[in-house]
Amino acid sequence: MLPLLRLTRPLNLAIIVLTMAAMRYGVVGAWLDHTSAAMRFVAEDPSVPLVAAIPDNQLHHAFPGWLFWLLVASTVLIAAGGNVINDYFDTRIDRVNRPETLIVGRTVKRRVAMAAHLVLSGAGLLLGLFVAWRSGQLRWALIPVLAVGALWTYSTRLKRMFLIGNGAVAVLSALVPITVGLYEVTALAMKYPLTVDLFESDGTPRTLAFDFNTPWFWILGYGVFAFLTTLAREVQKDLADVKGDEADGCRTLPIVWGTGWAQAVAMLYLALALVGVLFVRMRLLHDPLSYWYVGLAVIAPILLAAGFTYNAASRREYTTAGNLTKAAMVLAILYAFLLHRTVWNVALLSPALN
């Protein structure tokens, strides 16, 4: 059972759970608190609701918690199934690159690995379809269907194709935070009015608008960051796995363009991610906690990852560069839980109510 569990890559699955929780409880949760505080500030009497449907001027998640955790379970199961099938088809590569960690065909029979993939992916797909139906957002049922299909196609074909395999993994990584936004923010827009018509004490009419763009700004930002850092990490993995990939006929970036160009491309992806982080840090994050956290916990690992990528001369060094990139991803995700105390607390973004 333990070898089969290792095939699912529990650490990567834990990062998925962390990412989705950060989007709901960090980003969306902070926006809800900030918006509610703004409503109470605008109201002449904070205890009197501005809108009858919003008691005590306090907004709450419109996407139910139990459905959210079913969505998380669906995503984790689909990802676990994808990891299993990836190792199933990577046996020849792993015999060259990681013979000591080879599981499929050694400690786990191939038919057992295939059965595990089908069970995990099938369960995740059914849960995803149920969440879309139960939440009344059936259009998002396409997401788990596409994810299952993309992970199978990646393992069987796309991984061996020049650039396309890396792009597919990066898109799926970006889809994790974005999926939460699609359900959470859409549910909020369905539950709460976009605008509130009020009258000043002198009778002057006033319209207040809920700013749903702010949570989307952060969620899409995390999606772009995940996309770029995943691209960098995929190239770093390709650099580490050249021998096995060549033996399996893969057309990865270092095989087609050479090691030097592959290193340059990986550093370009990291540089683009760094530019995005610096933009947010300089334009939005002026409180001391954000300034130092982002600098030390996100920017520093990215710079170290770029340095290791440039100077790497062995598989171990490329693996270290990839681990540093992953560390930057995780630490950036953790920052979402600080939004209550940083960005929104000092009102550096556009007001929740205009």
Image (cartoon, grey):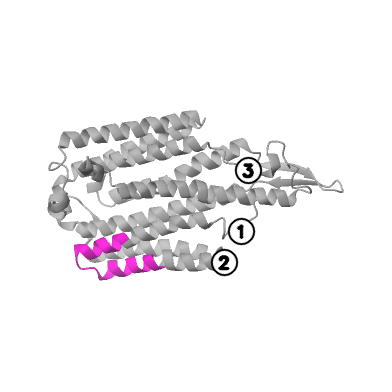
For image coordinates 64% across by 49% down, the residue present is 35
- x and y percentages locating residue 308 in the rendered image: 29, 68
Where is residue 232, by image quadrant? bottom left
Under circle 2, the secondary element is: loop
Viewer-side residue, 90 vs 272: 90
Under circle 1, the secondary element is: loop
Magenta range is 300-323
Q: Are marks 2 and 3 in contact (CB under 8 Å)?
A: no
In which quadrant of the rendered image does the N terminus lie? top left
* Lower sequence index among marks 2 and 3: 3
Query: To which residue does mark 2 refer?
Result: 287
Name above or below for residue 23 compared with residue 323: above
* Lower sequence index among marks 1 and 3: 3
Is 275 within the magenta?
no
- What label sits on residue 59 in the rendered view? 3
Query: To which residue does mark 1 refer?
Result: 345
Q: Are marks 2 and 1 in contact (CB under 8 Å)?
A: yes
Where is residue 193, by image quadrant? top right
Q: Give the CA separation, mark 1 to mark 3.
A: 17 Å
Query: What residue type is disc 2 on?
Result: Asp
